[in-house]
Image: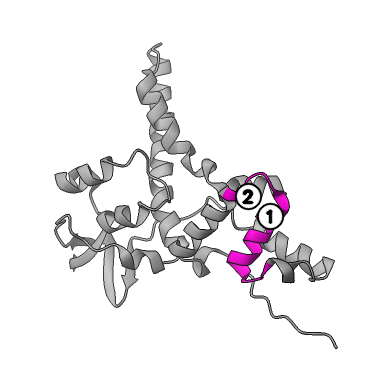
Amino acid sequence: MKQILEIKVPNDYSAITLTKFLKLQKDLKVYSDNEEAKLATLFYHLCNVEPGIMQKIDTSTFIKIKEQLLSFIARQDFQLKQFVNVNGVEYGFEPNLSQIAYGAYVDISKYNELTIDENWEKVMSILYRPVKKKVGKLYELEQYTGNEPSEHWRDINMEIHFGALFFFINLSKALLKNTLKSLIHKHQEIPPNIKSILAASGEVINQSSLFAVETSLK
């Protein structure tokens, strides 16, 4: 007697929380040299399919699921979500980074690079804070204290997290592009430290194990 197996395959990152994403990243690094194991890891974390069950899926279904997963895991077209509702509280993205509180600047700067890792929830708690007041398109956030809770960001979907990350990646790429044009026009060399910092910020997403997996499995 055949058994019917229902497999829910995500179409995007909206069904994947930060907690799930970090677990997936961790396991993918463990199996970095094993293509079959990496694919099984994707099935397990994203579709809740055990490795033993994966082997029993018919070929056509297996290929469809694989293609659907690979179609979105390496997306890079995320948009910044200016406002996010977390447990009934509206949070807003820092409206003026050039005037961000010094304490917030110091706390973000202590991380070597902005990337999705175990420290990312703390970065999000700095960038997003409860909305205090809104007037038209303008808004004011609660003042940064340095003691903002960050645990709730673990349950927020990756569309939100990637939106914030890509805001900085796109910003750094634009800065690098404009810096290059300016220096080339003046026939000057880019200072090595500036070049490395900008390049690292712009390329950080390509170092993610998920993006490497998407490329290798294709």
Instruction: Give me the C-alpha separation between circle 2 and circle 1.
Output: 6 Å
Q: Secondary structure at mark 1?
A: helix
Q: Is 112 situated left or right of 106 in this image?
A: right
In this view, which residue lies farthest toward the right? 1
| Residue 135 position in % (x across, y down) | 18, 66
Within 10 Å of the Cα at label 1, are there few (<14), some (14-19), or many (20+) other Cα atoms? some
First of labels 2, 1 by sequence position = 2
Q: Quadrant of the N terminus?
A: bottom right
In this view, which residue lies farthest toward the top? 187
Would residue 172 be visible to someone looking at this image? yes
In this view, 62 is above or below 95? below
* Front residue (pair 66, 162): 66
Amino acid under label 1? Answer: Ala
Q: Is 38 situated left or right of 112 in this image?
A: right
Amino acid under label 2? Answer: Tyr
| Residue 190 position in % (x across, y down) | 39, 18
In this view, which residue lies farthest toward the bottom? 1
What residue did someone put label 1 on? Answer: 37
What residue sits 18% from the left and 59% below the top? 147
In this view, 196 is above or below 174? above
What residue did someone put label 2 on? Answer: 31
Q: Which residues are magenta?
A: 30-50
Q: How is the image coloured?
A: one colour
What residue sits 66% from the left and 54% below the top? 38
Q: Is residue 70 magenta?
A: no
* Front residue (pair 2, 79): 2
